[in-house]
Amino acid sequence: MELEEKIILAKSDSSLREEIIHDYVNFIKARASEAAGKSVTESDDDFSVAMIAFNEAIDSYKEDKGKFLSFSSVVIRNKVLNHIRSERKHYKIIPFSSLSATDKDGDVKEFDVADTKSEINDAAVEIQAVTQELKRLNISFFDLPKVSPKSKKTKAACSLIIRYILSEPTLVKNIKTKGILPSKQIKDKLKVNDKLLERHRKYIISAVIILRGKYDILSEYLSFVKEGEK
């Protein structure tokens, strides 16, 4: 089967998508290195950007766009270059010396320089870790945007379900070890419908995995779950 045929199938087959991404890691790394003008390793944020770009290329590819590898190379290059420009702009706004301030006692308080790049790399490490954890449960991390709740009402319903599961240690354990969503128990307890549970099953399971794992950065993207407790 030609790669282009596999790409079309991978749009709806998460296992095949993961297989293709795994097989082309070196290709992705090479394209990222070309765009960055340096050797890029898997721990670099440029590599994480390139991985995301390759995944997006799968989603947006059509047969009339020619060979997939040529098409994805352009997507990766554009994404990595945009990321690099964004980073340069961030670091060149103003010199650190101009960011000092004076406290209430009149003393100069120097600006505390934080390494924002390390935060990006930490996020990449978390993404790699949770991708492997979800893969055991036949869930692709890259599918989550498609199954995430979009409307405010649906988001609130998913938040309620996630909080209920998190409050039940046994349910959390079953989800983490078997990927089983206790649909009947949730429906009886929260009166939600089958369609919502089925449509957002992967999202709910993934949210539980992230919130009960050591994923501090990714957990920030699920802050609305905790906010719903207020």
Image (cartoon, rainbow, N blue to C red):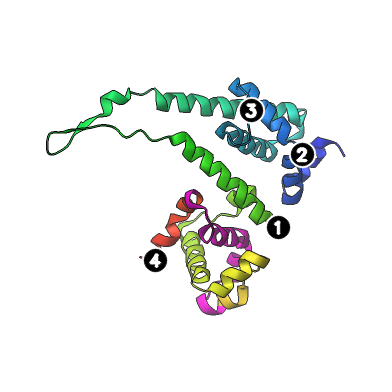
Residue at the spot x=51%, y=65% of the render? 162
Which tag, 2 or 1, sits closer to the chain's start?
2
Q: Which mark is residue 23?
A: 2
Whether the magenta-drawn stretch holds residue 199 is answered as: yes
Q: Mark 2, mark 4: which one is toward the viewer? A: 2
Mark 4: secondary structure: loop
Residue type indicated by callout 1:
Asn
Q: Residue at x 48, y 63 (%)?
A: 159
Label 3 neighbourhood size at 10 Å, few (<14), some (14-19), many (20+)? many
Q: Which residues are the magenta region?
A: 188-217
User: Is the residue 223 above or below the residue 97 in the image?
Assistant: below
Q: On the picture, is 162 further left or further right than 63?
A: left
Inter-mark Cα distance, 2 to 4? 43 Å
Q: Which residue is mark 1?
A: 138
Q: Secondary structure at mark 2?
A: helix
Q: Are marks 2 and 1 in contact (CB under 8 Å)?
A: no
* Residue beneath disc 3: 32
First in residue order: circle 1 vs circle 4:
1
SS under mark 1: loop
First in sequence: mark 4 vs mark 3: 3
| Residue 184 image label | none
Report the predominant secondary structure element of the magenta stretch.
helix
Q: Position of residue 43 (x, y in %)?
A: 59, 36
